[in-house]
Amino acid sequence: MALRVRLKGVTGKSRQGWRFMDKNNYYVVRANTLEDNVVCTK
């Protein structure tokens, strides 16, 4: 499985999250411009 994402955050304005599933796993991606990071968990 491959996932490609392009993000353009506006510094200090928002937090955004996405959820997706494949056959065996559940994923959460969180982009936080307030803390200047992106976190992906499985």
Image: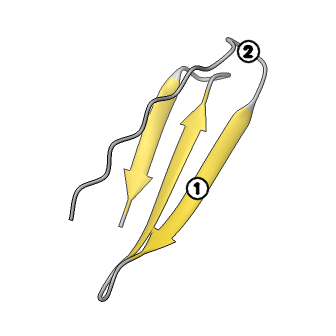
Give the amino acid at mark 2. Answer: Gly
- Furthest-left residue in this view: 1
Secondary structure of residue under mark 2 = loop
Q: Which residue sits at x=48%, y=28%?
A: 37
Residue identified by numbered label 1: 18
In the image, which disc is placed on residue 12?
A: 2
- The CA span between labels 2 and 1 is 19 Å
Q: Say above or below: 7 vs 16.
A: above
Which of 14 and 22 lies nearest the eye of the viewer? 22
Q: Say above or below: 14 vs 21.
A: above
Q: Position of residue 26 (x, y in %)?
A: 42, 76
Of labels 2 and 1, earlier in sequence is: 2
Q: Which residue sits at x=76%, y=29%?
A: 14
- Furthest-bottom residue in this view: 23
Q: Position of residue 19 (x, y in %)?
A: 55, 64
Q: Position of residue 16 (x, y in %)?
A: 67, 42
Give the amino acid at mark 1. Answer: Trp
Number of marks present in the image shown: 2
In this rendering, position of residue 28 left or right of residue 11: left
Using the rendered view, name the quadrant where residue 35 is placed.
top right
